[in-house]
Image: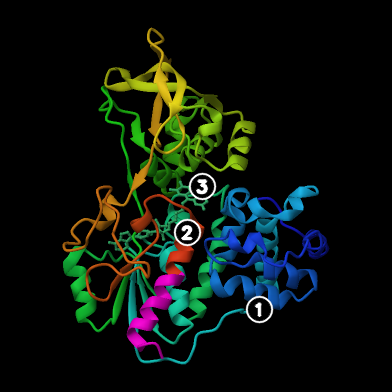
Amino acid sequence: MDLGYTYSQAVAEASRCLLCHEPPCSAGCPANTNPGKFIRQLRMRNLKGAIATMYCNNILAASCGVLCPTCTLCASGCTAQGLDRPIDIGGLQRFLAEHSWEIGFRPIQAAAPNGQKVAIVGSGPAGLMCAAELAQRGFSVTLFERLEKPGGVLRHLLPEHRLSAVFFDREVKMLADLGVEFKCNQTIDGRAGLDELLAQGYGAVYLATGAWEAVRLDLPGADAGGIQGAMGFLARSKREPQVVKAEVKDKQVAVIGGGDTAMDVAVTAQRFGARDVYVLYRRSYAQMPGNPEEKLEVMQEGIHFVMLTQPLGYTSENGRVNGVKVLRTRLGDPDFGGRRRPEAIPGTEHVLPADVVVEAVGLKPGKGLKGFDGLKVDASGRVVVSEAGETDIANVFAGGDAVRGAALISHAIGDGARAGRAIADALLGGE
Ligand SMILES: Cc1cc2nc3c(=O)[nH]c(=O)nc-3n(C[C@H](O)[C@H](O)[C@H](O)COP(=O)(O)OP(=O)(O)OC[C@H]3O[C@@H](n4cnc5c(N)ncnc54)[C@H](O)[C@@H]3O)c2cc1C
């Protein structure tokens, strides 16, 4: 991560704000971080007020400042872009968070205990935010996490160049300071695990298990060695970087897909020493779903974007992949989602040599929810919930990627906060 703003730079950036009466930036934040208010406070040099505004609705405000695609969220409606460029809302969030750590300011506090306890399953952004919301209302909160440390995707999948572990740890520490208890290396195993939590006296359970199952293409030849899903590649790159470095060093790596996950895989492979990294995508650059700013940065890393290219299968030698069979496409009419549909161009089949292939074509809740009998899920495996996040099992709520499928951190934060309030209302009877 690069260096953030200094104090005077941050105030100067905030001073470009046009102080909209009904700020479109605040309306554009799914986590309700309220940039319209904290930028105004920062501009007036009310730093503690700005930090408190930012953190009271978003416990991961600093991580969001670094990772959110602000150009499609809060900054997309910024009126300053009519004059020059939108306010750098993410950069200001990061500055305020770093300033609060520097001066030891704790913007949020736990309320006096109300005697009730809540269990949260999964410690990604949705689980962490729900925990913060409940602790501030006096609940005793225990977070159960199947992995060795809390943080979900942000800790276990995002490459270090996107979010430093030291930086993220400081935000997670705020939850420990609120009295939230973390029980890591503890999987809540299906319906029996859920019922056990309720039997142990937890008044409610929040399921925030994320979307960790990689969608696979199931192409001919996919059983050859060297072909893998994005989640496995990214998780191993964090857990055992030396092993993955040895696998990709001086190799030709093909990444199939065009979203954020594909970009993270491509840059990781490049920085781990791959000779060439190709991103294969069947539509064109403009249709790629990833964050527009990130796509540009990835291109600047020297990654080759091979657009309008559809994978058909894999070639291999001695059981290991040595190429991706592909075909050129052209864009036809829009599909039901509004994006122009890729159409095959006959006779353009060819093989792109590749020693390692990573499929990054989508994620679904799948594995995290196996065995939760009685939980209503839709055809894509996402938990079905009410507006407040209630599932059809009494006192069990859900949110984040487990409900939405692969989405954004700010959506998960918004869900966690909403569910925290709904759980508090349900258990305290609106007190
Ligand atoms: C590679 C990648 C890059 C991304 N980049 C961005 C980005 O730049 N900007 C952005 O806004 N969004 C990004 N996202 C999306 C964002 O990370 C997710 O939307 C967000 O993390 C979802 O939060 P969550 O709390 O729902 O789940 P997660 O973060 O997935 O956390 C779920 C947690 O639940 C745990 N768990 C699962 N089952 C159990 C169980 N039975 N018992 C106990 N624990 C369990 C898991 O181990 C995990 O820690 C990215 C996603 C990926 C995969």
Q: Residue at x 54, y 37 (%)?
A: 267
Query: Which SS type dominates the magenta stretch?
Result: helix
Mark yes or no: residue 289 visible: yes
77 drawn magenta:
no
Where, quadrant-wise, is the C terminus in this rendering? bottom left
Looking at the image, residue 419 sits to the left or right of residue 2; the answer is left
Of the numbered discs 1 and 3, the one sitting upstream in the chain is 1
Instruction: Name the mark nearer the viewer: 2 or 1.
Output: 2
Name which of mark 2 and mark 1 comes first in the sequence. Answer: 1
Going by the image, does 248 lie left or right of 3? left
Cα–Cα span, label 2 and label 3: 21 Å
Q: Is mark 2 within 8 Å of ligand 1?
A: yes
The residue at which mark 3 appears reads as 159
Q: Which residue is mark 2?
A: 411
Q: Is residue 321 above or below residue 201?
A: above
N-term mark: 2 or 3:
3
